[in-house]
Amino acid sequence: MKPYILLIVIVFLLRSYGASSSEDGDGTSLTSEIVGLLNGTYHSLDQKICELQKRVDAMNGSSGNQCGCNTTEIQEFKRLISNEVRDLSKVLSGVENDIRILKKGQAELYEFFDRNGSDANTTPDPTNAPLECDSGWISSPEKCYYVSSSSEKTEWAIARDRCIAINARLAEIKTDEEASFIMNSLPDYVGSNDLFYTGRMRNDNNDWVFLSNNEVVDTFVRTWESGEPDGGAQGCGCTQKADDFNMHDCFCTEFNLFYICEIMR
């Protein structure tokens, strides 16, 4: 199987089972480990070639001191080492090319899934709905909420994928009452002006909808903050404590914010 085909299978499985990215705790993925192994192989082969070449050079430097009876054996040994160096160099070139293919394929595939493939997985599996919320989560009669830590601040799409990875979704805060409940239950490390990404986005029709089912936001029960939405390139939903958790629109990229995940109970 060609390396890029193997990579497609690996990344598909990683995405399917929520083991991606990376943008996880330490950023390690199976594809990254494969590239790491190939890099290790590359450096190991490169080192072996250098060692063999040194032996050939040493023999070339000392051959004049060898007795005539050993000349044939020495030349034959040098020839064998030179052949091994040549063969290893071919393998090394192939490994180096495989590393380039894997790295390029990995980047292209993750970009493709981020752009086109994630929406298919935005609805959590209802069969896994918890009876009790995990420790550290905010619990309401209807939902469990996970509030990200300060070290987890990230862009909107990554926040979405992280929620999916724990069988949740970005919190779709549908009423002002729900917003008030979450706001009053936030951890102490959250400041008044800290922004949170939520599961709300602007679609191609310029309507604000909830991420899981494209339901249009009902502004009779959910309030925009004064002056919002600003429009322009701000196409992702967010909110903050200083504005009573009313709705804001935010930039989807280049800003690392807190986020809130939710699981239905």
Image: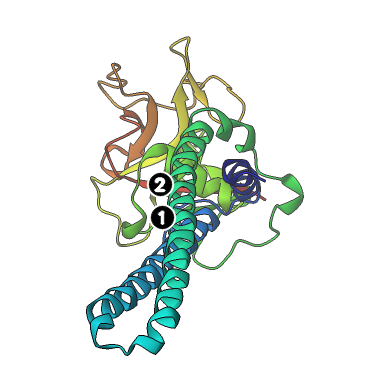
Residue 259 is labelled as 2
Q: Which residue is mark 1?
A: 148
Q: Residues within 10 Å of mark 1 (few under 14, many from 20)?
A: many
* 248 versus 202 height, above or below: below
Q: Residue at x 30, y 55 (%)?
A: 190
Tag 2: residue type? Tyr
First-in-chain label (2 vs 1): 1
Residue at the limit of the structure toward the front, as seen here: 68
Can residue 28 be spotted in the picture? Answer: no
Using the rendered view, name the quadrant where residue 225 is placed.
top left
The residue depicted at 37 percent of the width and 59 percent of the height is 149
Asked if 159 appears above or below 59 in the picture, the reply is: above
Residue 210: x %, y % from top left: 53, 28
Q: Amino acid at mark 1?
A: Ser
**Residue 211 falls left or right of residue 22:** right
> Which one is nearer the viewer's eye here, 94 or 250?
94
Residue at image coords 35%, 32%: 252
Locate residue 236 relative to residue 190 in the image: left or right.
right
State the SS at label 1: loop
Distance from disc 2 to disc 1, alpha carbons, whole Å, reads 6 Å
Residue 208 x, y percent position in the rendering: 46, 20
- Residue 233 visible in this rendered orientation of the protein: yes
**What label does residue 102 carry, if any?**
none
Residue at figure coordinates x 39%, y 29% from the top left: 236
Task: Pick the residue in front: 130 or 115.
Answer: 115
Residue 114 position in % (x across, y down): 49, 35
Given contact means CB atoms under 8 Å apart, are the residues at marks 2 and 1 in contact?
yes
Q: Element type at marker 2? A: strand
